[in-house]
Image (cartoon, grey):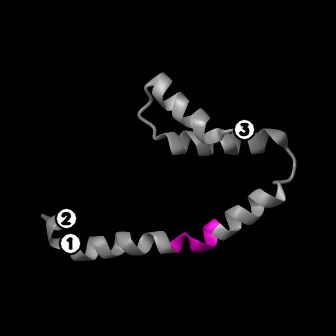
Amino acid sequence: MPYELLGEVSAIALHLPIPDPVLSMTYLFATLWVRLQPVPNFLDLTSTVLLSRLPLLFIPTGIGVIVHFERIAA
């Protein structure tokens, strides 16, 4: 199922203040939960790789906070 498309269409059609990627992940989670079957191998491998790289996404944010700390404090 194209969860990304489903999330985007839902966000636009229902005028929700929730970002469409959040809706897409919610639909994917609900589908996996309802299926009551093991997670497919391709999804398990993809999520494992993405989760192992997740800390890299926080480096630019941390640097931005440090660089602009005075502006944030004001």
Q: Quadrant of residue 52?
A: bottom right
Q: Which residue is mark 2?
A: 72
The mark that comes first in sequence, 2 or 3, is: 3
Magenta highlight range: 50-55
Callout 2 secondary element: helix
Please name the predominant secondary structure of the magenta segment in the image: helix
Residue 69 x/y as whole percent: 20, 72
Q: CA distance from mark 1 to mark 2?
A: 5 Å
Q: Quadrant of residue 70?
A: bottom left
Closest to the observer, 29 or 6: 6
Residue that appears at 64% across and 40% down: 3
> Amino acid type of disc 1?
Phe
Q: CA distance from mark 1 to mark 3?
A: 43 Å
**For the residues bearing labels 1 and 2, Cβ distance under 8 angstroms:** yes
Q: Which residue is mark 1?
A: 69
> Amino acid type of disc 2?
Ile
Closest to the observer, 10 or 32: 10
